[in-house]
Every structure is written in C-alpha cells, then in structure tokens.
Image (cartoon, rainbow, N blue to C red):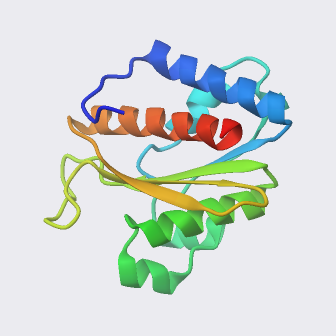
C-alpha cells in the first residue's frame, strides 16, 4: 500500500464491505482496539447496515491505563517499549480477541501528529496488529505521510485491508 495514498470515505467503505463479506463468509465476529484512530475503524465497519451480524466490539484506548485495564496490556511492556511499539500492539490485539469474544481482531497504535514524534518514532509511525482466534498475533509497522487526518485515514485503510487478508489468507 502506497504510504502517500489518499483513501476517501468511499474507498474506506469499500474496504469495510470486504471485511463484512469475509467475516460473514467465515462466520466470525470482528473486534477492534484503537488508539491513534480514535474509533474510526469501528465507525467505518458499523457504518454498514447489518454490521451487528459480524461486528462484536470496538474499544478506544488512548492512555496507558486504558490499554492496561481494557486490553490487559502489561504495564512493563508500556514502560519498556512505549505505546507505539510492536510489543504493545501485539498485546492490544491479543487482549481484544480474548476479552471481546470475536473471531478476528485488529489493533492500532501510532503517532498521527502533528506533534509527538521523535527521531526513533517520527510522526506517521503506526503499528497495526491482527490476530485470528486460534492463530498467532502478528504486526507490521507503517510510516505514513501527510497530516494528522491523512495518517489516520491510511491507518484505517491498512487495518481494514489486513482484516480481509487475515480472514481470506
């Protein structure tokens, strides 16, 4: 996926439709654990009529304490690697899958900007993790360009596309 692509609402809607079709086909419920996207992935999914047939739950965990209490992220992981890390997103997606009874989950954590970036983790750094029940959690780092909205929009698109891959792969 081109890191500078623009995903308009129609494109995100198309990706959400693909998630819906795959979830219905596999008879699994979907859960989301979001930080930098603030619930946008869940919104894209629940914008579809009938989403209650395949969408289980979405949780927005911005703070360390929310990641710990709502997803079971280990405080030591957050202290050691920070919120924007592979370790944290893997614990987020595993926690979402375990706590919300879904068959597949996605988690995102990143730096959407315009501030908050560092030399090691510049603005646009986003970790996305996916996990299917009975499978292993896996994650990928992205370096998205553009302003805050563009980073968040690209994150939603990549998260949705990854759910489709997870279910159909």
Q: Is residue 47 visible?
A: no
Vertical order, 11 against 34 (above or below): above
Q: Please tell me which residue is depicted at 26% across the width and 48% down the height of the picture.
A: 124
Q: Quadrant of residue 24?
A: top right
Residue at (20, 35) in percent of width and height: 146
Residue 169 screen position, x and y as percent: 65, 40
> Furthest residue to the left?
119
Q: Residue at x 62, y 34 (%)?
A: 164
Q: Could you say where residue 137 lies in the image, as x and y percent from the top left?
A: 61, 62
Residue 159 is left or right of residue 104, and the answer is left
Residue 81, compared with residue 14, is above or below; it is below
* Residue closest to the far front: 169
Residue 134: give x, y in percent of width and height: 78, 61
- Residue shown at the point (48%, 86%) measured from the top left: 76
Question: Can see residue 26?
Answer: yes
Q: Is residue 130 above or below residue 92?
A: above
Taking depth in this image into account, of 78 and 132 the one nearest to the observer is: 132
21 w.r.t. 118: above or below: above
Q: Is residue 45 left or right of residue 125?
A: right
Q: Position of residue 168 (x, y in %)?
A: 69, 36
Please state which of residues 64 and 32 is positioned toward the viewer in this rendering: 32
């Amino acid at each position: 996926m081109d890191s500078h692509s623009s995903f308009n609402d129609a494109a995100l809607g198309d990706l959400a439709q693909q998630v819906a079709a795959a979830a219905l086909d596999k008879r699994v419920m979907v859960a989301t654990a979001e930080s930098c996207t603030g619930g946008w992935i869940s919104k894209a999914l629940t914008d579809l009529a009938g989403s209650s047939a395949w969408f289980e739950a979405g949780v927005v965990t911005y703070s360390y304490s929310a990641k710990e209490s709502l997803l079971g992220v280990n405080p030591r992981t957050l202290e050691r690697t920070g919120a924007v890390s592979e370790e944290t997103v893997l614990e987020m997606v595993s926690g979402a899958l375990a706590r919300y009874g879904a068959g597949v989950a996605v988690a995102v954590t990143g730096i959407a900007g315009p501030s908050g970036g560092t030399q090691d983790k510049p603005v646009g750094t986003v970790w996305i993790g996916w996990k299917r029940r009975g499978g292993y959690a896996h994650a990928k780092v992205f370096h998205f360009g553009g302003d805050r909205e563009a980073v968040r929009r690209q994150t939603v698109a990549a998260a949705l596309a990854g759910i489709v891959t997870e279910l159909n792969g």
